[in-house]
Amino acid sequence: MKNKKYILEMFPYPSGNIHMGHVRNYVIGDIYARYQKLKGFDVIHPMGWDAFGLPAENAAIEYKTHPQDWTLNNIKKMKEQLSTLDLSLDWEKELATCDKDYYRFQQEIFIDFYKKGLAYKKNSLVNWDPEDQTVLANEQVIDGKGWRTGAVVEQKELSQWFFKISHYAEELGNSLDELSEWPEKVKIMQKNWIGRSEGCEIVFNIEDSEDKINIFTTRPDTIFGATFIALSINHEILKAIFDDKIIKKIKIDFDNCDDKEKIGYELPIIAINPVTGDKLPVYVANFVLDTYGQGAIFGCPAHDDRDFEFATKYKLPIRKVMDCSDEELPFTEDGVMINSKFLDGMKKDEAIETIIKYFENNKSGNRKTNYKLRDWGVSRQRYWGCPIPVIYYEDGSYRVLDKDELPVELPYDIEMDGKGNPLIKHDKWRNIICSKTGKRALRETDTFDTFVDSSWYFIRFLDNKNPDRPFNEEIVNELMPVDKYIGGIEHAILHLLYARFFTKALRDIYDLKFSEPFKELFTQGMITHKTYQNNENAWVLPSDVAIKNKKLIQISTNQEVKEGPSEKMSKSKKNVVDPDEIIKNFGVNATRAFMISDSPPERDLEWTDAGIQSSKNLTNRIERFFSKDFDNKKISEDQNKFIYKNLYEMDKNILNLSLNKYIANIFTLFNYMEKEQINIKNDLGKKILICLYPLFPSLINKIFKDLFDQITDDIKWPLIDEKFIIEKIIDLPIQINGKFVTTYKTQIDYKINDIYDNLITTPKINEKIKDKKLVKKINVQNKIINLIFN
RNA sequence: GGCCUCGUGCUGGAAUUGGUAGACAGUCUGGACUUAAAAUCCAGUGGGAUUUAUUCCCGUGGCGGUUCGAGUCCGCCCGAGGCUACCA
């Protein structure tokens, strides 16, 4: 396919009802897809379902149903809802991630990841809800309590599967620079998340001990100012010094103290500064992260805010190693080194280079690049997800299954009681005899994080019926990457980073020729709506509010209500509008129009009754206009020009997804055509209709048929010849001394000297320049003339 | 605290990327049609002044700068929003 355009909107979670956010997302994508199709591209525009996930399990418990039944039923309902939106989707490419035919290949990919060293198992701390007997995601823990049970969440160490996203940390960061069609904002967010920093790792010896402490720092230049060492509570060395009880006690102290407060305990060991030989006290401190670097820092209080705070509190020495004259400490900017022997006189960067070389020569440290990005824990103690294809033998060893043992199918006959993962209690499914060894074994009962499902669906779409492999490389290489990916900004980091990681990993495993999944990214804004609360602070439906005697009152109770800000639509704040209702009351065309009216697609759109009504008025106007008869009128050259110019603008605006301007073009066009009574039963009329078609497919289809007895299947976007648009006579703005005075009618491509004499005799200009002398003529050809008089 | 984005009429927003600020829409006001309402159509709608005009002055958060010319570029300040949060 030579002329392909792969246009994709983020697929929805099948919650059962589409909401306005979906509508906006898919309408924006559809306008673009239809436009590109009219432009002659082979458009790929699939849709599917992000169908695994927690809500299905919760719904199953609440409504005594089965996650699968609930999900499949929702998919059916939502597909019907989508069908009312006039979307041009390739439904033959449809997929649902909960379908065995999808997730079996995800299991295959996992096996490949494992073989390549990109998937591994290790112990890690997780949020454990003791009542539900399950692991919670970070965002499901609110104020230290489980969001569903309210039970205090514990930190529990579990053996979990990880994807080695850190292997690609460097590339994920670097190749962001090549994504020129991504919003700068998203790229910055990802860069910060990856958090690359350059520095070095320094080895500190411990007095009278074989133990060593490794410390990563970006400021090795301040090593002469080091006055203490601090370790995180989970640092290995602690286990050699204290028994568990004491560590637990310190942990409790740390947990109980204020987040911002820095506390620590001195340890009975002494570290040696590898450069100066100084003896440094070693602390365990609450502000040292154990997940970054080596979970240890050296403190240089004079030049670090945090170290300064800690040193002040515990009366540790503060040694200045950077000349900052009168500046108050801590001084964290660049300066000239002092009190640092061979570093003295150097600026920060030079000092860093010099000291790293010193460490490397003395074998007491190494240059190192560190990342905030940590490996991706993908195990979820959940039923409704893709099973991880691993089995465990009685001796505790495990085996990742071979591809010929797939799929590991999720059993249907489970009991959803809300207590833990039902797979654990499903003995028949869980207990197996290993077909390769004949040994008894247990299946892995964890399933994948659902972000895994959405990390490669855009590839599977292209070959969704392939029964043998995740995808055929030839097809995928031809059709990837996605040319335009449209979705919410809330996925700026996780989903988009995971998908980029998957793409790179799949490239290195299969024979894929692309490194980035999404060439252009467009993040659309949310839909907001006014909120109202009554005297008891209960939320009130906007439709239940009216103005009476200049006061806002709730219609149903006649109570006064107060108006809050316009916020993202949410059920809890009662400020949602139901797409079904809107489409029923205003029609699909007006609904589509409002999704792009009022604000640019990348910004939030405020839902207003006046707004949707205005869109409805527009569609009515269009229908009315095309049913009128201005048959015998001839179209003048000026009229032609005006209309073509407008169509030309529409073209540009859809291409840039400046869809609010596209709507403005439509209004301008109809304001004009109604006033001028333009005859549209001709080729010009056809062209106009085609330019409206991406937004109003069903409406235009109907008009097209009524007017021309022709269907819209075979139409092409009109070529607009520039000669229709370029003006030969222009109104040139004239400035005197930089201030606008008047316009001057002239031929395009005039010569300033030819028109000058005439220009200054025009009354308005003449009046301004009386008794003044010309200093300078500034001519920006065909744009503006600025005359400087003195 | 750090990073980022954004401040334009009553409101949402335009402004060819440094060249006539306020397109288009909403709101409101007045008028036409109607027994009436809705719908529709017409006119007006940044502020101020005045001789009411093809008029003048001011005006894009504030102060300064660059430029023939700044909503747009630069510096500082004020305000709003987003992300991140002791990342050594």
Image: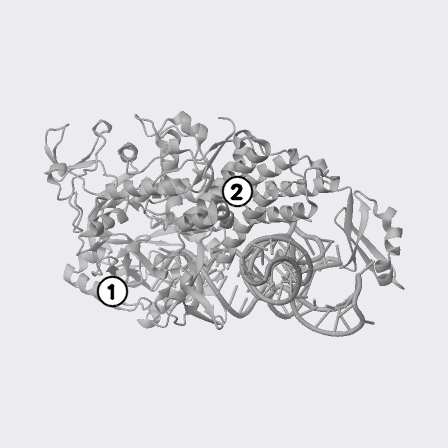
Closer to us: mark 2 or mark 1?
2
**Which circle's residue, 2 or 1, is located before the other in the chain?**
1
Q: In terms of depth relative to the viewer, which is nearer, A423 or A393?
A: A423
Residue A480 picture location, percent across and down? 44, 32
Location of the C terminus of chain A by quadrant is bottom right
Residue A428 picture location, percent across and down? 11, 37
SS class, disc 1: helix
Q: Chain of mark 2?
A: A
Q: CA distance from mark 2 to mark 1?
A: 56 Å
Residue A375 picture location, percent across and down? 31, 45
Let me know if residue A329 appears in the view: no
Q: Which residue is disc 2 drawn over?
A: A695
Coloring applied to the structure = one colour
User: In the rendered structure, which amino acid carries the disc numbered 2?
Assistant: Leu
Q: Which residue is disc 1 drawn over?
A: A255
Q: Quadrant of residue A509?
A: top left
Residue A211 picture location, percent across and down? 23, 53
User: In the rendered structure, which amino acid carries the disc numbered 1?
Assistant: Asp
Q: In terms of depth relative to the viewer, which is nearer, A151 or A353?
A: A151
Asked if labels 2 and 1 share a chain, the reply is yes
